[in-house]
Amino acid sequence: MNKRMCATALGGLLAAATAPQALAQTAQVYGQVRLTVNSIKAGSASDTKELRDNASRLGFRGTEDLGGGLTAAFGLEMGAEADTGASTVPAFRNSYAALKGSFGTVALGRLDSANPTGSPLYSQVTAITSFAPNDAGATAIGTAILNSRNRTSNAIGYASPDWGGFTVRTRYYLRGAPATPDVENGAKSLDLGLSYAGGPVRAGVGFAKDTRPGGLGNNEFDHKWQAGLRYDFGAFEPYALFGRDSYKNTATSRRDVDYWIVGARYSQNVHAVTLNLMKRDVQASLTGERKRWQLAYIYALSKRTELQAFIDRDGIDSSRSNVAVRAIGAGIRHDF
């Protein structure tokens, strides 16, 4: 019996000695709660009052030092509709596993700009522009105006090391079965981005391309490019971002859809003001333009809590009458 116990103990010691050991492991629980009370007026209809969530979330993320300059990372971030308590669809904003080393960072899973490889297009948007005050709810522009392709399922992402301020990001994603009719469908997508951050300058240029087995459908996205620049003068930070999306068009719709946003953020102590002006061609119309402007004020109660107020005026489509939407709102954001 003693010999058996000694052999078992020795085997356990040998297994422990030869098993890979983490040098250091960290895990974090984090999140954001964003809520505003809004007044929405569409066309000539009466105002609608609403309490609205603006991309609240709860997440878990962590890293493990594997030694030899290699680090593993994971993340699970759930979307939460803080106004109703419901989960978003899909339930997770991101869910990934990643490895980082001298070669850069590689991530697999459902990826957005919060994963370690970032987003080839959307990371440029967040670095160059300022939202007024959220890219969600009544003031969302990342998808509606910029088509910045942030959150993608079944994705493989890569971010290079920092080369003198330059970073290359790439992402390829399968987006589900070819017959799937929803947004994350059978199209195969490739996104590329080159970004620069040095001193007062933030800049980037990006490209994206979609393909589909059997060819793209009518008015389906084909490819895009974007480029932008931001300069920090201190309290005043102006910026501009331009792009073109191309589609498989028909005789009554556009092949090329041009868009731009110009704006500035002014901040002084706990106060900040953001103004955005933007325009996007309407793809379904040969003449329509979507003109929009936003003005937001933010008061920082602390590093984690801010009060927000905004006004947003979206023309929707200049070729149609009585479709413009005006939104006015105020609320609170808390990060934890």
Image: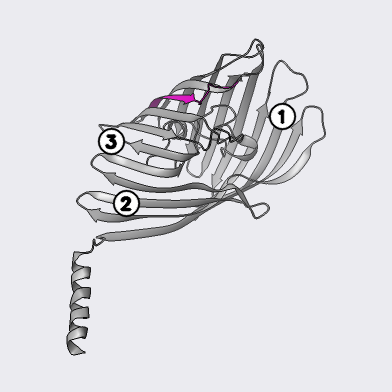
Query: How dense is the environment of label 1, judged by Cα within 10 Å: few (below 14), some, or many (20 and up)?
Result: some
- When asked about the image quadrant of residue 227, the answer is top left
Q: In the rendering, at what x and y percent does residue 273 appear? A: 55, 35
**Mark number, residue 162:** 3
> Which sits in the foreground, 312 or 126?
126
Please give left or right for residue 329 compared with residue 93 in the image: right
Tell me the kind of residue under disc 1: Val
Which of these two is toward me, 289 or 231? 289
Whether pointer 2 and pointer 1 mark residues with C-beta atoms closer than 8 Å, the reply is: no
Mark 1 lies on residue: 325
Residue type at tag 3: Asp
Percent across and percent down for residue 55 are 58, 45
Which mark lies nearer to you, 1 or 3?
3
Magenta stretch: give its range: 202-217
Residue 206 lies in the magenta stretch: yes
Q: State left or right for residue 9 relative to residue 75.
A: left
Q: Residue at x 56, y 37 (%)?
A: 135
